Amino acid sequence: MPDFFKDIGQIKYEGKTSTNPLSFKYYDPDRTVMGKPMREQLKFALSWWHTLGGDGTDMFGVGTADKKWGGSDPMSTDKGKVAAAFELMEKLSVDYYCFHDRDLAPECPTLSESNEKLDIIVDMCKDYQNKTGKKLLWGTAKCFDHPRYMHGAGTAPSADVFCYAAAQIKKALESTVKLGGNGYVFWGGREGYETLLNTNMSLELDNMARLMRMIVDYGRSIGFTGDFYIEPKPKEPTKHQYDFDTATVLAFLRKYNLDKDFKMNIEANHATLATHTFQHEIRVARDNGVFGSIDANQGDMLLGWDTDQFPTNVYDATWCMYEVIKAGGFTNGGLNFDSKARRGSFTPEDIFYSYIAGMDTFALGLINAEKLIEDGRIDKFVSDRYVSWNTGIGADIIAGKMTLSDIEKYALQKGEVMDSLTSGRQELLEGIVNNVLFS
Ligand code: XUL
Ligand code: CO
């Protein structure tokens, strides 16, 4: 087995007083938090594309990091990636990974050649999984980077492009099933539009639903019992992505009767691009029974695009884990670091520092979420705020006992209701949160 990171050993938990940069300060995989070991609560996953493939290339310059993994052509590089990925997962105690088909193996001149190459790498991954116990969290198809998908894949104006995408997704799903993955993601890379002057939006969305229905039915027929996810994003690469945010996706799923098979894969940076908080997106999913998985990263409020930075904001991670715990924890999903080291962080050690920073941040988030839930003051405040719905008129409305006319009669008798208002106490609550987090 090649040793790409031979100067770096197993990353261990050393506690918050350690100054060793190659150690976890907060992530202690075996520590029990909210009734389960951290590694089971957090279910960290490595993103194949950023970690093994992302070399720092941007719109203004070529890559800065060597991501050839000892290879001299696409296939030998892709084989090197497998060895590097499993070495990283082992050394970082990351138990899962996620891939796009074309991250694993190259795009070839024909679909059948691409499929053959994919089979070779999938078999390699399966061997490595068997040897290491690492698992696939979810797979997906890269139906957005090849020029054939310039106008979309499932929403392409060309029926031939739709068929190519359908066949590619079928193969990506088969590969996911072969590797025992419990999730399959649809992220609509170019499923959207630039202008309505050339777009039949209704046909495009009907077609996307047709494709999803076919894939779900096929997946179930080959024994896939996991979750299908949609990953909302409002823009980038298209001006208007169809899967704008969780609420928009829910309306789509319900319209096409797909809501029983799909859950959400919520990405922090996509939430903020939609001008929502990360927590808002998870809450909408949780309240509607479609919370599935997380793409962990963060954006930069001063930049307007998907920067996919490793998450280091402890407040955001805290509210994420608070929602995840309230949703009952992860089942098939997990925390996939859809994150990349900055272009200037180009050395192999930077991969380790990035994951350590992200994992420690989410460990803190989990610990903090437990503290907030156990403290109980926030939960109590929220439940007290709605106390008028527990008895009397409020309870009768909820029970469906009151008509609009009954309510009108009540309001006329009651008169002015200003004295029923109570303060929202936002500043008090923010202070309590800081008190709980830093005590
Ligand atoms: C793009 C993005 C994707 C999806 C998988 O913004 O997040 O990497 O997670 O296709
Ligand atoms: Co993502």
Image (tube, rainbow, N blue to C red):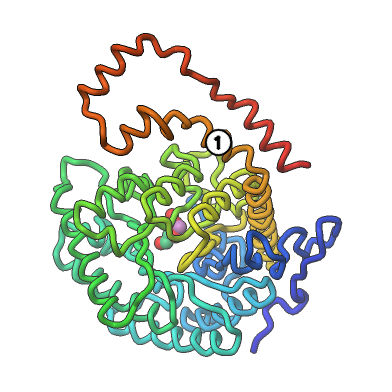
Location of residue 98 in the rendering, given as x and y in whole percent from the top left corner = 48, 70
Disc 1 residue: CB within 8 Å of ligand 1? no
Location of residue 327 in the rendering, given as x and y in whole percent from the top left corner = 48, 55
Is residue 324 placed above or below 412 in the rendered structure? Answer: below
- Direction front: furthest residue: 392
Is residue 9 placed above or below 329 in the rendered structure? Answer: below
Number of residue marks? 1
Ligand 2 sits in quadrant: bottom left
Quarter of the rendering containing residue 148: bottom left
Residue 69 showing in the rendered view = no
SS at mark 1? loop
The quadrant of the picture occupied by the N terminus is: bottom right
Residue at image point 17% right, 47% down: 201
Report the side of 30 relative to 230 (left or right): right
Report the side of 420 relative to 210 (left or right): right
Kindly identify the amino acid type of the residue bearing the numbered disc 1: Leu
The quadrant of the picture occupied by the C terminus is: top right
Location of residue 424 in the rendering, given as x and y in whole percent from the top left corner = 54, 24
Residue at image point 31% right, 16% down: 411
Q: Mark 1 points at which residue?
A: 302
The local crowd at label 1, few if under 14, some if 14 to 19, many if 20 or more residues have their Cα within 10 Å, is: few
Is residue 127 placed above or below 230 in the rendered structure? Answer: below
Along the viewing direction, whichever of 69 and 208 lies nearer the viewer: 208
Report the side of 338 relative to 186 (left or right): right
Residue at image point 39% right, 77% down: 176
Location of residue 279 in the rendering, given as x and y in whole percent from the top left corner = 50, 44
Residue 398 showing in the rendered view = yes
